[in-house]
Amino acid sequence: MGRSLQVEWQEKAEELKQKYRAEKHPQRRERLFTLWHLRVGKQMREMSELTGTDERLIQRWVSWYRVGGLEEVLRRVTGHGTVGAPAHLSRLQQKALVARVKLGDFRTVWDVMAWIKARWGIGYSYEGMRSVLKRNQCTIKVPRPQSEKANPQQQEDWQKKGFKTH
C-alpha cells in the first residue's frame, strides 16, 4: 500500500460526483470520475486499474488540481471543442481565403500557399494548408484541362449520337 494522498480538496465528494454525472465530454468525465473516487479515499493505483488510465497520468491530474483546482484539470482536456494552438491566419484572413477559393482563383494547394505567403508573409506546410482548407470547408476543384484543338460541337454530337466511323 502506498502512502495516502495529500490534497486540499476544494469540492466535496458529492459535488464531484454531480459534476461527473452531468459532464458530457468523455475526457472531462473520466477525470471527474477519477478525482471523485480519489476524494472518497481510493488509491491512485486502484483508480488506474479501474479506469485503465496510466497511474502517472492520474498523478499529473492531481498535480494540476493542486495548482489550479478542478478548473485547471478540466482546462487541459484536449480534443474536440477545445482550444489548441492559435491559428496562423486570423479569422478575417481565413474569410478572405475562403472568398478567393470560392472565386476559383486557385488550381492547387501550392497556389494557395504561395498567395498566403505573398499576401501576409505566413508560411504553411502542404499538409498544414490542406488542414486549413478542410477546416474552412474549402475544396479546390477545377475543370480538367481541354485541348485547344477540341471542337465542343463535335464532342456534343458524339455524346448524343455515339461514335460513328465514316
Image (cartoon, helix red, strand yellow):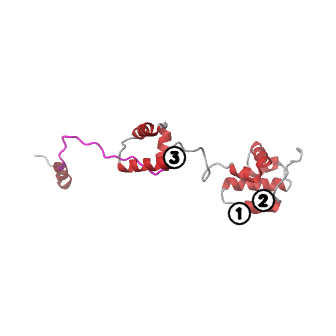
Judged from this view, the residue extending furthest toward the left is 166
Mark identifier at residue 90: 3
Separation of marks 1 and 2 at Cα, in angstroms:
10 Å
Q: Main secondary structure of the magenta part?
A: loop
* Residue visible at 50% across and 40% down in the picture: 128
Relative to 83, 126 lies left or right: left
Is 45 within the magenta?
no
Q: Which residues are magenta?
A: 136-152
Q: Are marks 3 and 2 in contact (CB under 8 Å)?
A: no
**Given the image, on which type of amino acid does mark 3 rest?**
Ser
Q: Earlier in the sequence, mark 3 or mark 1?
A: 1
Query: Which residue, given by chain and number where applicable, does mark 2 sit on?
Result: 16
Q: Quadrant of the N terminus?
A: top right
Mark drawn on residue 1: none
The image position of residue 59, as x and y in percent, is 78, 44
Q: Which mark is first along the chain, 2 or 3?
A: 2
**Quarter of the image where one finds residue 39:** bottom right
Q: What residue appears at the point 59 percent right and 44 percent down from the top-left corner?
A: 85
Q: Amino acid at mark 1?
A: Ala
Q: Earlier in the sequence, mark 1 or mark 2?
A: 2
Pointer 1: what residue? 22
Element marked by disc 3: loop
Tell me the distance, in whole angstroms, between the alpha carbons under discs 3 and 1: 34 Å
Which element is circle 1 on?
A: helix
Question: Residue drawn at (61%, 49%), measured in percent from left and top?
Answer: 83
